Image (spheres, rainbow, N blue to C red):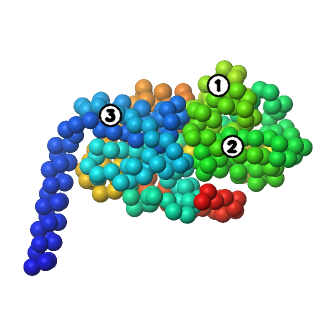
Amino acid sequence: MKGLIAATATFLLTNSMAIHAQTYPTKPLRMVVPFPPGGTSDFLGRVAAQKLGEALGQQVIVDNRPGAGGNIGTELVAKSPPDGYTLLTDPGSTLTINPSLFAKLPFDPLKDFAPVTILAAVPNLLVVHPSLPVRNVKELIALAKAKPGQLNYASSGAGQSTHLSMELFKSMAHVNMIHVAYKGSSPAITDLLGGHVLLMFDNMPSALPHAKAGKLRGIAVSTARRSPVMPDVPTVAESGLPGFEVSVWFAVLAPAATPREIVERLNGILVKALQSPDVRERLSSQGAEPIGDTPADFTAVMKRDLAKWAKVVKDANIKLD
């Protein structure tokens, strides 16, 4: 009897989800961005929200929920109903670095989410305040060695790629600099522009306008290849630290158990949008490389980067709780 009841319940739930997927969406959606407005997550989240809204015929509201290195907004989506109405635009750092940094993370990146697609990959740009007398990586390393523990650097949050990029840099260059963590890229850049901190690695779309305007000095990019939008700026690897490479991706996810039909529909819309000339130009002009992969490929990237960053965190002996 219990088996019959369980089978009936499963049938009714499956049937209900199938009907829901067929009529979806019937109301506005929410795109949660776990960082403040003005950063790369916010920029890409708004691009995705716009294109989803146009294709679905419903408004997609961007909801910024910053805090705890992205964990607050990410947990909110993980615990939301799996009905396709609450989505997440998250950087790979929250999903693949935070699990190694926090002893008790309120979500599991592989179990609590249905991956939709990776939107884009971006370099981190190493920028310094104009008052800092360095114009390249070798000069920065020399200054840091001459003034151990006296140079401070910003990040968009403890454990974010902007933080781990500099920790990797410090480890490879054998220098000591002081970390100042912010609740997002925008407030970090604001203080860097004001000279309250001296340098940082920041996602290219956030740092690019200030570097082009001469308000900050871009001295290197974190990726293995130079960025097409700043071809004269060398990579960290070619500037004195061979082997240094950090690439950051940003993606859209739904809560786990979201109907497969809905995930596939969202994936199809976003992949098509990322292939369109207007979106490619919009992203490329900001130093972002459009991706648009399958949920399965996205999952494989998460598994790979979870292992990669676990080693970096262990080697740097970083713990946040």
The three-letter code of the residue at mark 3 reads Val
**Residue shown at 53% from the left, 42% from the top:** 121
Q: Is residue 283 above or below residue 70?
A: above
Residue 60 has which mark? Answer: 3
Q: Residues within 10 Å of mark 2 (few under 14, many from 20)?
A: some
Q: Is residue 295 left or right of residue 125?
A: left
Is 176 located above or below residue 199 in the figure?
Answer: below
* Closer-to-camera residue (29/270): 29
**Near-viewer residue (44 or 264):** 44
Instruction: Kindly report the distance in space between the C-alpha atoms of the residues bearing marks 2 and 1.
Output: 20 Å
Where is mark 2, residue-wise?
A: 180
What amino acid does circle 2 point to?
Val
Q: Which residue is mark 1?
A: 210
- Picture coordinates of residue 235, whole percent (x, y): 71, 40
Query: How many numbered circles does the render carry?
Result: 3
Residue in view at x 36 percent, y 30 percent = 50
Q: CA distance from mark 2 to mark 3?
A: 34 Å
